[in-house]
Amino acid sequence: MIAALAPDYFPGIEYCAVMASVERFVVVDSFQYSRQSFQNRARLRAPDGYQWISIPLIGGQFGKAIQDVRIDNTQNWAKKHEKALVYNYGKAPFFEHYASDVFDSIRSGSELLGSVTVDTVVLVHRLLDLESELIIGHMARRFAEGMLESPPVEELLFPENCKRSPYCAKHRHRIMRFEHPNYRQQFSGFESGMSVLDLLFGYGPAAAGILRRGIRAGDSTS
């Protein structure tokens, strides 16, 4: 089974559950950038609920492919994101274990959104120790172009809200049902929809098992 999604910035738990459910996961940065997405932002657990961290973009990016969207590096956004992570997760059990890798990804200095977001997807895939083959860069773009003409041999898998991929309405595919698991967070109460960093900082190597708890068998559709 195979899935193809746009890259999200430190993606959420459901996104990572899709990566954990397939043999091949294609990270397609040639998809169009969407302002109503997680492509340049992530949600962190905070004392009062949650906090957004967003990568600022240069104006006029609407309609461009994610790989071509330019970051506004005149704003010191990397330092702000690091401070938010330290404030919200500095006392988490596995923060020190993962912080260096996460900060290195934030400090890449790239001017292109696609480069940063693909890097964060690759990073969390590695930190979760997922077994799926990750396809990125030129090979991912070629795969996406080929899907316009003919579906892949493998069955496609998409999350229930598959607006993230323009192909889910064109080819036969399977929908992954996901019931967000509850788990202990850094602050009282529970907030769903956090970046997978919330799980990694809190649970370390056990994070992948927790996100898999929410995966349910899906239905095939045309």
Image: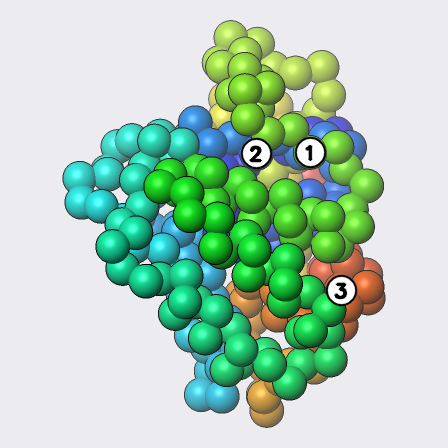
Check whether the beta carbons of the residues at disc 1 and disc 2 lie within 8 A of each other: yes
In the picture shown, does residue 110 fall above or below 55? above
Residue 40 visible (yes or no): yes
- What amino acid is labelled 3 in the image? Ala
| Figure quadrant of residue 204 | bottom right
Q: Nearer the viewer, residue 148 or 138?
A: 138
* Residue 73 percent across, percent down from the top left: 30, 51
Question: Which residue is labeled 2 in the image?
Answer: 27
Estimate the spatial distance between the alpha carbons at disc 1 and disc 2, rounded to whole Å. Answer: 7 Å
* Element carrying mark 1: strand
Q: Is residue 130 positioned above or below 171 on the image?
A: below
Left or right position of 141 against 158: left
Amino acid at the residue labelled 1: Leu
Locate residue 220, reporting x and y percent. Answer: 67, 33
Q: Which residue is mark 1?
A: 134
| Crowdedness near tag 3: few (<14), some (14–19) or many (≥20) residues, C-alpha within 10 Å | many
Figure quadrant of residue 51: bottom left
Residue that numbered label 3 is attached to: 207
* Residue at the spot 44% in from the left edge and 88% down from the top edge: 48
Q: Is residue 82 above or below residue 175?
A: below
Q: Camera-side residue: 129 or 21?
A: 129
The image position of residue 47, as x and y in percent, is 49, 88
- Give the x, y percent position of residue 40: 39, 51
Q: Residue sitting at 43 percent across and 52 percent down?
A: 38
Q: Name which of mark 1 and mark 2 comes first in the sequence.
A: 2
Task: Compute the Cα span from label 3 to label 1.
Answer: 19 Å
Q: Residue pushed farthest top?
A: 149
Upstream in sequence: badge 2 or badge 3:
2
Mark pair 2, 3: CA separation: 21 Å
> What's the residue at 41%, 43% (across, down)?
110
Secondary structure state at the residue bearing disc 2: strand
